[in-house]
Amino acid sequence: MEPIHAQHLIEPGLVVLDISAADEATAHAVMTALEQRRATSGIGHVRKVPGEPGVEARMYADTRRLPAE
């Protein structure tokens, strides 16, 4: 994954979530659940690293806002 730089998180309440899961379906389920509870960047791209077990994904969230805002 790309490094997280300070400019990504310029305000309190903004977070970057790196998700590791056993499979793509699990990663999508987690991102869907988070998206229903907070304002997020949405379902992110799920990557499989060759030779490594599981998958990875990244999503951004604003803990100050609910998804309907």
Image: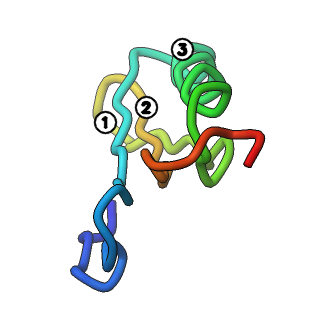
Instruction: Give the structural element (helix, strand or loop) at label 2.
Output: strand
In this view, 35 is above or below 24: below
Residue at numbered disc 3: 26
Residue 59, image x, y percentages: 50, 49
Residue 2 in percent (x, y) is at 32, 69
Residue 45 drawn at (x, y percent):
62, 48
The x and y percentages for residue 19 are: 38, 35
Q: On the image, numbered disc 2 is attached to which residue?
A: 55
Q: Mark 2 or 3 closer to N-term?
A: 3
Q: CA distance from mark 1 to mark 3?
A: 19 Å
User: CA gap, disc 2 to disc 1?
Assistant: 11 Å
Relative height, residue 27 to residue 12 (above, below)? above
Q: CA distance from mark 2 to mark 3?
A: 9 Å
* Residue holding disc 1: 51
**Please, what is the three-letter code of the amino acid marked with disc 1?**
Gly
- SS label for mark 1: loop
Q: As rendered, which of 32 and 56 lies closer to the eye?
A: 32
Amino acid type, label 3: Thr
Q: How many marks?
A: 3
Q: Amino acid at mark 2?
A: Val
Q: In the drawing, does residue 6 fall left or right of residue 26?
A: left
